[in-house]
Amino acid sequence: MRAAIAAESVGIPSVSIVCDGFAGQANATARGLGFDGLPLAVTIGHVDAQSTEVMTANFVGQTVDHVVRGLTSAEPLADVDSVEPAALEVVVRGDIDTVQRSFVERGWSDGNAVVPPTVERVERYLDASGHDPWKSLGVSPSSGRDMTIWSIGVNAVMAGCSPEHLPILIALAEILVDPAYGSEHSGNTTGADALIVLDGPNLGALGFDAGQAAQREGVHANTSVGRWLRLYLRNVCGITVDEHDKATFGNPARPALASDPEVLSELGWPSVGEQLGGDRGRDTASMARMNSGILIGSVFGSTPEEILPYLGNGIARAAGWDLTHVHGLGTDQYQPLLIVSPLIARTFVTAGWSLEDTRRGLFEHARIPASLFERFIGSWSNLTPGRRRLVDLVAEGVLPPVFAETDDPDRLVPVVPRPERILLAVAGDPNRANAYAFSNDGPHGWWTTKTIDHTPASDLVCRI
């Protein structure tokens, strides 16, 4: 699509070839990039599951006609008409049951009941913030829709967020519009979903919980902010099955994860936001898309040396095809997250270990056999070209020497190129020794951090 848009932008006609079932997403992507109705040609079936003969026959039998049509006709392959209501338009009238049924039918809810976002409710939600409701933070790259303060407020009302959470939602919207995050990848086929990590001294006063049962629904602040993200992705960014959501298996919405600021202060460890370059001592919102997670339960041991093998094994077990982001889909862009309980974190600090020491220890233990690594990025996947061995990639300067200390296929190699790629968060029950490892989707939702600005805005507020 990007190559086609580059060609179209200088007047060269193009046709983008897309897989079966992806025409709707392609049309939405083109619209988001300012090229509504970009010509498409669709292949039949999944190309990876076809023989060369079948794929050739399908291509000649259908796709070639689509290519010719795209180059010779102004008529689009698929319907791209999109009539959407205006921001202040009343789209449904009636009782609460009528509203809920209408929102579900139109795909504007996540399937659960929503708070009806009446104009009056949204106005009240934004009133004390000082923000101009029509100020745009940018354009969603996946849908072409303006990401306005008003749209943030509409989905905040629907999710049941409190008005004091608006600065957090604005920071999250800034992440979604940041090219570094790449929100247009939010519906890719592997189904990775965003994880919000909140850090800072003001979170407790805002109702966020970092203690027992972290990541469980039930705490209003954590749950509603996590739900806002899913609604905003649907309603503004177009991450729905009709547009951009092509996930084979989706993940449920995740409540926002809040780090424990008091424990971090006690330990002297930087927060996730600070590890990613955020301002020290400021509230930050960080986000990345996670493929999967693994509980590391009942971590046993009273010293770092005793517990590191188990923690490292958990990080390694969480990784799989994601290792194509170590080399392939995004070189040196795999950055897993390990969440440890305060009890585990204190074990390291009591032994005199800094965060950097802990990362280095995890780096040494989060390892798998080289032959398995090569299967993940090679023979079990077509996502890394060439199926080259790790020793060859090191010789070419693509990977660091630690991946080729010998040529023994059973040697252990790390799952990240350097210790700094392992992020550490501290949360959960302070009296239990459990941890959780997340694998991330590399540049398909790259870790991005924004500072949360709680200062009332000085915009010229429009009165509706």
Image: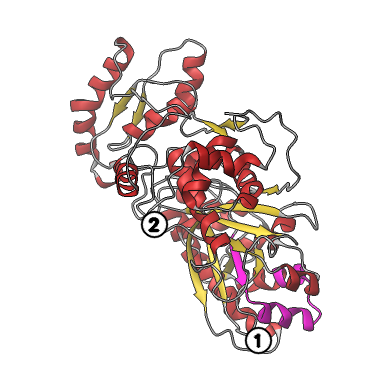
Given the image, on which type of amino acid does mark 2 rest? Trp
Residue 162: x and y in percent read 58, 53
Label 2 or label 1, whichever lies nearer to me, is 1
> Quick check: can you spot residue 183?
yes
Image point 55% across, 75% down: which residue? 313
Label 1 sits on residue: 306
Q: How is the image coloured?
A: secondary structure
The residue closer to the viewer here, 391 or 139, is: 139
Asked whether, in this view, residue 380 is left or right of residue 366, the answer is left
> Magenta span covers which residues?
336-359
Per the image, label 1 sits on a secondary structure element best described as helix
Residue 391: x and y in percent read 58, 57
Q: Going from the N terminus, do you reach mark 2 or mark 1 first? A: 1
Bin the neighbour count of mark 1 within 10 Å (Cα to Cα): few under 14, some 14-19, many 20 and up. Answer: few
Inter-mark Cα distance, 2 to 1: 34 Å
Q: Residue 285 magenta-drawn?
A: no
The residue closer to the viewer here, 136 or 176, is: 136
Q: Residue 357 magenta-drawn?
A: yes
The answer to whether marks 2 and 1 mark residues whose Cβ atoms lie closer than 8 Å is no
Label 2 sits on residue: 380
Asked whether, in this view, residue 244 is left or right of residue 407, the answer is left
> Quick check: can you spot residue 444?
no
Image point 44% across, 54% down: which residue? 378
The quarter of the image holding the C terminus is: top right
Residue 64: x and y in percent read 25, 22
Q: Could you say which disc has been placed on residue 417 in the image?
A: none
Whether 191 is drawn above or below 411: the answer is above
Residue 280: x and y in percent read 80, 56
Image point 80% across, 74% down: which residue? 266
Whether 420 is drawn above or below 29: the answer is below
